[in-house]
Image: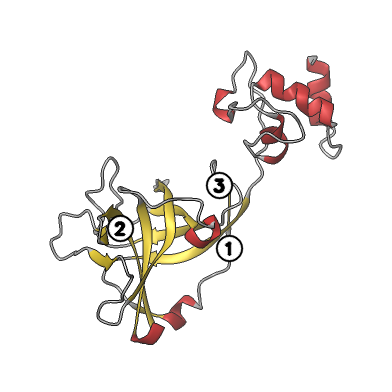
């Protein structure tokens, strides 16, 4: 496609490009028409090349491609050993961030959490520190498409007092034949793993579930 055609696309942002134009753009950008049009890597009716990823974009001129964002729900503070009244979670603000969909599960619900405490300050290869923000996928929205495996980093939710108090914390999963263990990775010895038998019998009246699958960690650097 000529440079004049590309410029014309930017001059008229309200006019949607045709399917044929999207196909041609995808060839030049070395990605799929599906990703260019919908942010999806799956091959569909537009006839993309299987396996082509947005990370393969390159060329003599940089063309900025708009990626569709979606609302990310705020899941509150994650902190080991900190049970909060469930009523407190009712005051959580509605989604205020727009985030790109997950690269592998673009239809899954994106969530973000603020990290407090030191229960994961020794996680490898990258520790999770107080003040970090973790971005995760609501586990229920994955609809059993992700098998549990050793090393997964997850947000675990525990409830006590008949569901009146709730704790959300980040843990790393270890799988055994007869149990699952959710481990802190910390230099603070007061943090202990959560151990769940394979029959999911609650211990000490606690209800435990995997609430979200952690996918990304960030920490904004202040300007001053």
Residue 67 place in picture, x, y as percent? 65, 40
- The quarter in which the N terminus is drawn is top right
Residue located at (67% from left, 32% from top) = 65
Residue located at (31% from left, 51% from top): 128
Number of numbered discs on residues = 3
- Residue 171 numbered mark, or none: 2
In terms of secondary structure, where does tag 1 sit? loop
Image height of 96 relative to 214, above or below: below
Asked which secondary structure carries label 2, the reply is strand
Q: Taking 9 as reference, is 202 above or below it? A: below
Q: Quadrant of residue 6?
A: top right
The reply to whether dot 2 and dot 3 touch (C-beta < 8 Å) is no
Residue 102: where, in percent of width, then height?
54, 45
In the displayed structure image, the side of residue 46 where residue 125 appears, left or right: left
Residue 88 occupies quadrant: bottom left
Mark closer to the chain start, 3 or 1: 1
Mark 3 vs mark 1, CA separation in Å:
19 Å
Foreground tag (2 vs 1): 2
Task: Check residue 95 in the rendering and tell me which mark sits there, or answer none.
Answer: 1
């Amino acid at each position: 496609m000529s440079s004049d055609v590309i410029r014309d696309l930017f001059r008229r942002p309200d006019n949607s490009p045709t399917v044929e134009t999207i196909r041609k753009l995808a060839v030049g950008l070395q990605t799929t028409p599906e990703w260019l049009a919908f942010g999806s890597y799956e091959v569909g009716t537009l006839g993309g090349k299987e396996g082509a990823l947005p990370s393969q974009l390159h060329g003599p001129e940089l063309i900025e491609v708009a990626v569709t964002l979606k609302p990310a729900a705020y899941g509150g503070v994650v902190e080991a050993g900190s049970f909060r009244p469930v009523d407190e979670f009712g005051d959580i603000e509605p989604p205020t961030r727009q985030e790109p969909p997950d690269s592998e599960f673009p239809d899954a619900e994106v969530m973000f959490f603020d990290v407090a405490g030191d229960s994961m300050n020794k996680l490898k290869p990258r520790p999770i520190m107080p003040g970090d923000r973790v971005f995760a996928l609501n586990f229920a929205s994955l609809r059993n498409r992700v098998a549990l495996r050793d090393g997964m980093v997850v947000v675990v939710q525990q409830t006590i007092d008949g569901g009146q108090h709730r704790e959300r914390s980040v843990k790393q999963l270890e799988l055994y034949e007869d149990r699952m263990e959710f481990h802190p990775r910390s230099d603070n010895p007061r943090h202990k793993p959560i151990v769940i038998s394979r029959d999911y019998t609650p211990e000490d009246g606690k209800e435990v579930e995997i609430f979200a699958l952690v996918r990304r960690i960030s920490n904004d650097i202040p300007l001053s």
